[in-house]
Image (tube, grey):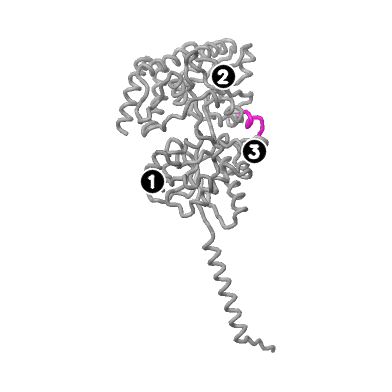
């Protein structure tokens, strides 16, 4: 039997190697930066986000990113719970509607300290940077620009011998054209347009075209009962002229792509957000065109505006804030990150990033990018964020428009009641 002798020197050497290995492991763990990222959205968005994170961590081996995603309705209650427990993700997706609330609660970190360093977003331009500011400090990085848009089934108009509505048409011309299409199409249950009287973006655009708005900078109702009476009357007249779908058809719309009258083959025009063109086209067999909302004609003001489709913010108590800022910069400026994200979160604010994604875009993607470029000199400023209660008022708008459509109230009665109810909701806070 052979004898294995372990000398004292060998034993010391072995112990030293083990100690070095343990120390190296501890140092590696100490250097590892583990961050959490939280966002809302579809599977498509999740796939793109995980891919971007993989690309970032492949380049930064000491960084680990744990991603988590939920749908919109489940996301915000979770964020509220995490904020209350001071356990927000290091990087979290933020909406313009909520950024003021969370910034002022101290849940988000000001990002000004990273500007020109970890965050290289100067080429965004002031409007696309300022949309992430609260009380003069930067709390959110714009992940893509967006605006409302009119989506049109062009072939339906062409088949009827009519020209489809384009950017620049006013509401009166639009109503008349949609009425003509309904008659010329001669298809039971098919109308020129959806009924958008219950849609908040449409009402806001129409009010801004008249020099008003939904809410003031102080968070108060900025429209009158007369404004609302006129609004409800315009859509009531379109229903009676069969220029838009009747109330019982519009009531089936759950304000998503799948149940919109355009998708269901009940109307030739829908009103949506520009980044939804891809989704609408995916479920519509006929080619869709994207144009601006109708105007109020001569003397009207710009109603539309560029809105950050969403933003990335950093939790106030993040222990890896600088790394979080570098990750955000990867999403909005680095060619690899920008390509991975594409235009799913909107059109990139950085011209350089837009050029990166443009090279790989299909026809629909290019149409979205071109649309944002086309409207850029035809829009107004970003309004103040909606006050608390705005979501309830948006739901009230849909309900009130339906009451007029089903003949339960006149447009004037509905305008007065809607205005009074909106004032009460804002006062309640």
Disc 2 to disc 3: CB gap under 8 Å: no
Point out which mark residue 356 bears: 3
In the rendered view, tell whether residue 255 sits above or below residue 23. above
Helix, strand or loop status at disc 1: loop
Q: Nearer the viewer, residue 390 or 134?
A: 134
Q: Badge 2 is on which residue?
A: 167
Picture disc at residue 106 = 1
Where, by quadrant of the figure, is residue 98 drawn? top left
**Residue 6 screen position, x and y as percent:** 62, 86
Classify the position of the C terminus by image quarter: top left
Q: Secondary structure at mark 2?
A: loop
Region of the chain picked out in magenta, as a range: 361-367
What residue is shown at x 45% (from left), y 25% (from top)? 199
Question: From the viewer's perspective, is 356 left or right of 296?
Answer: right
Q: Dot 3, how many residues are within 10 Å of its Cα: few (below 14), some (14-19), or many (20+)?
A: some
Instruction: Look at the numbered disc 3 and give the secondary structure of its residue.
Output: helix
Disc 1 to disc 2, C-alpha distance: 42 Å
The x, y position of residue 64, in whole percent, is 55, 55
Residue 313: image x %, image y %?
47, 44
């Amino acid at each position: 039997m052979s004898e294995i002798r372990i000398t004292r020197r060998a034993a010391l050497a072995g112990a030293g190697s083990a100690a070095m290995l343990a120390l190296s492991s501890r140092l590696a763990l100490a250097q590892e930066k583990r961050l959490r990222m939280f966002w809302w959205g579809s599977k498509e968005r999740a796939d793109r986000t995980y891919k971007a994170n993989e690309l970032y961590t492949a380049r930064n081996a000491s960084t680990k990113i744990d991603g988590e995603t939920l749908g919109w309705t489940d996301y915000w209650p979770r964020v509220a719970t995490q904020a209350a427990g001071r356990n927000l993700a290091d990087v979290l997706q933020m909406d313009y509607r909520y950024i003021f609330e969370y910034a002022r609660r101290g849940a988000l970190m000001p990002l000004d300290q990273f500007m020109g360093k970890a965050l290289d977003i100067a080429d965004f331009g002031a409007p696309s940077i300022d949309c992430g500011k609260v009380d003069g400090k930067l709390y959110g990085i714009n992940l893509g620009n967006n605006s409302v848009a009119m989506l049109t089934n062009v072939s339906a108009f062409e088949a009827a011998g009519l020209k489809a509505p384009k950017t620049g048409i006013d509401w009166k011309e639009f109503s008349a054209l949609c009425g003509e299409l309904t008659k010329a199409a001669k298809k039971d249950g098919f109308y020129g347009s959806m009924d958008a009287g219950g849609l908040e973006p449409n009402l806001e655009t129409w009010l801004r075209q008249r020099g008003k708005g939904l809410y003031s900078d102080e968070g108060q109702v900025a429209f009158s009962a007369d404004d609302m009476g006129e609004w409800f009357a315009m859509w009531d007249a379109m229903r009676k002229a069969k220029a838009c779908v009747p109330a019982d058809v519009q009531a089936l719309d759950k304000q998503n792509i799948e149940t919109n009258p355009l998708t269901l083959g009940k109307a030739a025009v829908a009103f949506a957000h520009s980044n939804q063109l891809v989704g609408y086209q995916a479920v519509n067999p006929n080619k869709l065109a994207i144009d601006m909302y109708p105007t109020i004609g001569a003397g009207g003001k710009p109603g539309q505006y560029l809105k950050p489709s969403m933003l990335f913010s950093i939790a106030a108590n993040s222990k890896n804030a600088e790394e979080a800022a570098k990750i955000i910069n990867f999403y909005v400026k680095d060619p690899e990150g920008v390509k991975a994200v594409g235009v799913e979160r909107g059109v990139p604010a950085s011209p350089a990033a837009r050029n990166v994604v443009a090279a790989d875009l299909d026809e629909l993607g290019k149409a979205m990018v071109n649309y944002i470029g086309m409207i850029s000199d035809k829009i107004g400023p970003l309004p103040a964020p909606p006050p608390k209660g705005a979501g309830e008022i948006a739901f009230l708008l849909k309900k009130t428009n339906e009451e007029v459509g089903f003949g339960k109230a006149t447009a004037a009665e509905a305008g007065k009641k809607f205005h009074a109810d909106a004032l009460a909701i804002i006062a309640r806070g």
